[in-house]
Image (cartoon, helix red, strand yellow):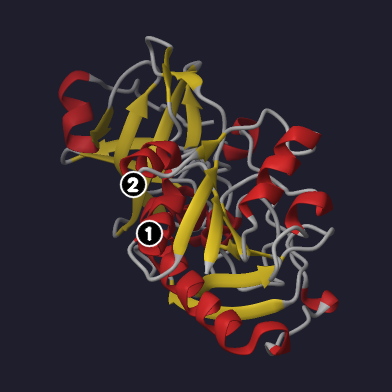
Amino acid sequence: MKIIFMGTPQFAIPTLDALCKSNHQVIAVVTGEDKPRGRGQNISFTPIKTVALDYGIECLQPPTLKKSDFISKLKSFDADLFVVVAFKILPKEVYSLPKYGSINAHTSLLPKYRGAAPINWAIINGENETGITTFFLQDDVDAGEIILQQKVNIPKTMDAGILHDTLAIKASQTILDTIELIEKFGKNINLKKQNQTEVTLATKIFKENCKINWDQPFEKIYNFVRGLSPKPTAWTTNNKINYKIFRLSEANVNFQKIKPGEIKIENGKILVSTNDSWCEVLEIQKEGKNRLTSHEFLRGNSFEANAYFE
């Protein structure tokens, strides 16, 4: 198949790589614009553009997807299929161009967790499994008819970063399997409509939504922290200083609690009270400093007596 691939971030790389190594022909890549990145604000390519250029594939970087010259350029490729992984919402005049339409790989078992942050919300909500869903694009976001779903387990120790990388690999496999089905059955492919009564949303997460509420059970806080680790990262405040919290574990202690958020330092450990137990902070980052284990952190930092995270 002649394929145009659309994607921008690191997540999309395994799929582009798998397509380039397959018997399909990636005839062009559409990705985000070059932008200033990092402390030096030097202009750099998107992760996908870097890979595409390594393969010698033409890259298109339109500022908008609705311009007539961009759409004309896409038409000129006469692609069989557009494959979309971690990219913008496509307008109908774009996704309807190819012979077999456009497919997307979404990081949830649709119709659960439609939206911008399905990986984070699945862990925050304590799900035991998630997966990749491929579907044909239509006007409503993440609402297209399902082609294929492949599940991934979420162990209790897995954070959003590990799940992200796991799903990136699973997406590449699922896309290849999906294309095989399209090649085999064409427009007669067996599709599954999404059950609208089972729809849940995975809304975009902003910094203000990442503050830890210590007045909750340990398990809820634990899932919240790992669901936001390593980014956008859960955070808390002590003495008007923000601290990012990357990892927690349950602490087997029986100290008397005054209120949730109380901090105790015991045997080189940072312990914090929740509303039903104590937990141990394993990795922490003070505002303006580096991410550290609690042992590393306590070598050069301390908390006042009777301190609290707020």
Q: Which mark is residue 243?
A: none
Question: In the figure, 73 relative to 307: above or below?
Answer: below
Name which residue lies at 44% across and 42% down: 48
Which quadrant of the structure image shows residue 42?
Answer: top left
Q: Position of residue 274 (x, y in %)?
A: 49, 49
Q: Which residue in the structure is indicated by mark 1? A: 20
The foreground one among 199 and 225 is 199
Q: Position of residue 110 (x, y in %)?
A: 67, 72
Name which residue lies at 33% across and 34% down: 284
Question: In the figure, 271 relative to 193: above or below?
Answer: above
Which quadrant of the structure image shows residue 166?
Answer: bottom left
Residue type (three-letter) at the residue carrying disc 2: Tyr
Question: In the figure, 104 relative to 284: above or below?
Answer: below
Q: Which residue in the structure is indicated by mark 2? A: 55
| Label 1 environment density (alpha carbons within 10 Å; few <14, some 14–19, many ≥20) | some
| Label 2 environment density (alpha carbons within 10 Å; few <14, some 14–19, many ≥20) | some
Residue type (three-letter) at the residue carrying disc 1: Cys
Q: Secondary structure at mark 1?
A: helix
Q: Examine the rendering and report whether any part of residue 230 can be seen.
A: no
Name which residue lies at 61% across and 73% down: 109
Q: Earlier in the sequence, mark 1 or mark 2?
A: 1
